[in-house]
Image: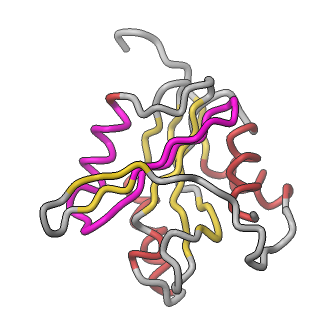
Amino acid sequence: PYAWAKLLYLRDAGDTEIGGFAVTSPDDLLLVEDVCLVRQQCTAITVEFDDESVADFYDEQVDAGLKPEQFGRIWLHTHPGDSPNPSGTDEETFFRVFGRCDWAVMCVVAQGGKTYARLRFNTGPGGSVLIPVAVDYASPFDPSDHVAWDAEYQANIKAITWRRGV
């Protein structure tokens, strides 16, 4: 519930896409407990992460005792429109960034509330499967922290205007 509330808050903070990494429970790698932003440039149709910021995020998570599968396998991002379906750019990014992982999830939450989530696995014969998005209210969760979430948004999101051909 905490991560879901934070993701919706970040989605609604501006009129661009935003992207982040899910931080999951060590006991359930699909139970998202937090959403973390890294520095990124965003438009209404793209998200471009700052490579140094991603590296710093990974270092911080490892220093905190987390394993890469807890913070580097679920890519969350938003679409400002009603469609959660991944774009061609989303698919290219997912393959480029997560293509070497044994498994990864791409999850999109659209402005209208629709969701899309796909688990891709690269072990065995490989493949992918659509998975449901649900909020587990039975798990303990912290209260919303709009002040901290807004500070994280302001520190990491650089909205730019997308222009065709530029």
Q: Is residue 160 above or below residue 49?
A: above
| Residue 37 figure quarter | bottom right
Q: Quadrant of the C terminus?
A: top left
Residue 109 versus residue 62 in the image, above or below:
above
* Count of picture labels: 0
Tell me the residue at 62%/28% (across/down). 80
Say whether residue 164 is left or right of residue 2. Answer: left
Q: Give the residue drawn at x 69%, y 36%.
A: 113
- 48 within the magenta span: no
The residue under the point 43% across, 60% down is 54
Q: In screen coordinates, is 37 left or right of 144?
A: left
Image quadrant holding the N terminus, namely bottom right
Residue situated furthest left in the rendering: 125
Residues rendered magenta in the picture: 89-118
Image-based side of 5 in relation to 131, left or right: right
Q: Position of residue 99 (x, y in %)?
A: 23, 55
Q: Which of the pair 89/49 is nearer the observer?
A: 89
Q: Quadrant of residue 87?
A: top left
Residue visible at 43% across and 72% down in the picture: 58
Residue 69, position as x, y percentages in the image: 40, 75
